[in-house]
Amino acid sequence: MDRPDHEDNRITLAPGVSVSADDLQFAFSAGSGPGGQNVNRRSTRVTLRVDVNAIPLRDDARERLRKLAGPGRMAGDELLINDGRRRSQRDNKQSCIDRLASLVRIAVQPPTPRKPTKPSRGAKARRLEAKRQHGEKKQRRRQDDW
């Protein structure tokens, strides 16, 4: 995956969508995972906080971004992205930015409208035949000598 551009203190998240690096807040903490005893001494886990309103998106795209993130990643209007899978703080930071860019790229694309479809004649016939056979099976189980 190509990395977002960092031009003039702005980070490009999607074509036509960039955010100021000042709008991204990073917090660092002790990570888990690979690293041995060193993992207890280094703050490699990264938490990225970004105000969703600071990302220049249309209202419908902003709503899609909120839904994509889900309730576990939203704290009010802030989007939270965590990563601590790698040993390097720099790599985890870049991974958080990449994941934000991925979410924004998906959110800016409008969903494809659903085309209503009808079941084919064969599908209807198969469904009706299955219903008839099921009814016959239940009919055979019935006791007539009550």
Image (tube, grey):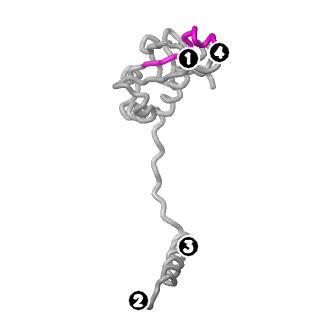
Residue that numbered label 3 is attached to? 126
- Name which of mark 1 and mark 2 comes first in the sequence: 1
The part of the image, by quadrant, that contains residue 6 is top right
Determine the residue positioned at 54% across, 78% down: 133
Tell me the crowding category of disc 4: few under 14, some 14 to 19, or many 20 or more residues within 10 angstroms, Cα based: some
Residue that numbered label 2 is attached to? 146
Q: Which of 120 and 41 is in front in this view?
A: 41
Residue 63 drawn at (x, y percent): 38, 34
Q: Residues under labels 1 and 4: Cα distance?
A: 9 Å
- Name which of mark 3 and mark 1 comes first in the sequence: 1
- Name which of mark 2 and mark 3 comes first in the sequence: 3
Please provide the residue range marked out in magenta: 37-49
Determine whether 82 is above or below 44 in the image: below
Say which amino acid is labelled 3: Arg
Say which amino acid is labelled 1: Gly
- Name which of mark 3 and mark 4 comes first in the sequence: 4
Residue that numbered label 4 is attached to? 35
Query: At numbered mark 2, what does the secondary structure look like: helix, strand or loop?
Result: loop
